[in-house]
Amino acid sequence: MVIKLLALDVDGVLTDGRFTLSANGEEV
């Protein structure tokens, strides 16, 4: 799960910082 979160974080930052926040909040 940690790996997935990291991947989402990196992908989100590269694609859009907002996506990271949304994904991170939803995942957590």
Image (cartoon, rainbow, N blue to C red):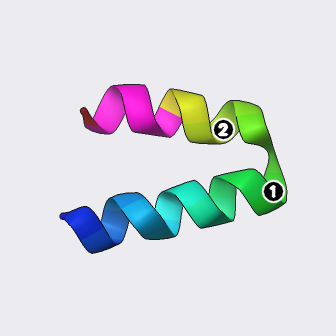
Quadrant location of the C terminus?
A: top left
* Secondary structure of the residue carrying numbered label 2: helix
Q: What residue does disc 2 label?
A: 19
Is 9 above or below relative to 2?
A: above
- What number is the disc on residue 15? 1
Q: Is residue 10 above or below residue 3?
A: above
Name which quarter of the figure residue 15 lies in: bottom right
Task: Check residue 1 for magenta coloring.
Answer: no
Measuring from the top left, give residue 12's x and y in whole percent: 67, 53
For disc 1, the neighbor class at 10 Å (few under 14, some 14 to 19, many from 20) is few
Q: Which residues are magenta?
A: 23-27
User: Is 24 inside the magenta-drawn segment?
Assistant: yes
The image quadrant of residue 9 is bottom right
Q: Residues within 10 Å of mark 2 (few under 14, many from 20)?
A: some
Q: Residue furthest left?
A: 1
What type of secondary structure mainly makes up the magenta span?
helix
> On the rendered image, what quadrant is the N terminus found in?
bottom left
Tell whether label 2 touches label 1 (CB within 8 Å): yes
Find numbered disc 1 in the image and state the secondary structure of the residue it sits on.
helix
The kind of residue on which mark 1 rests is Thr
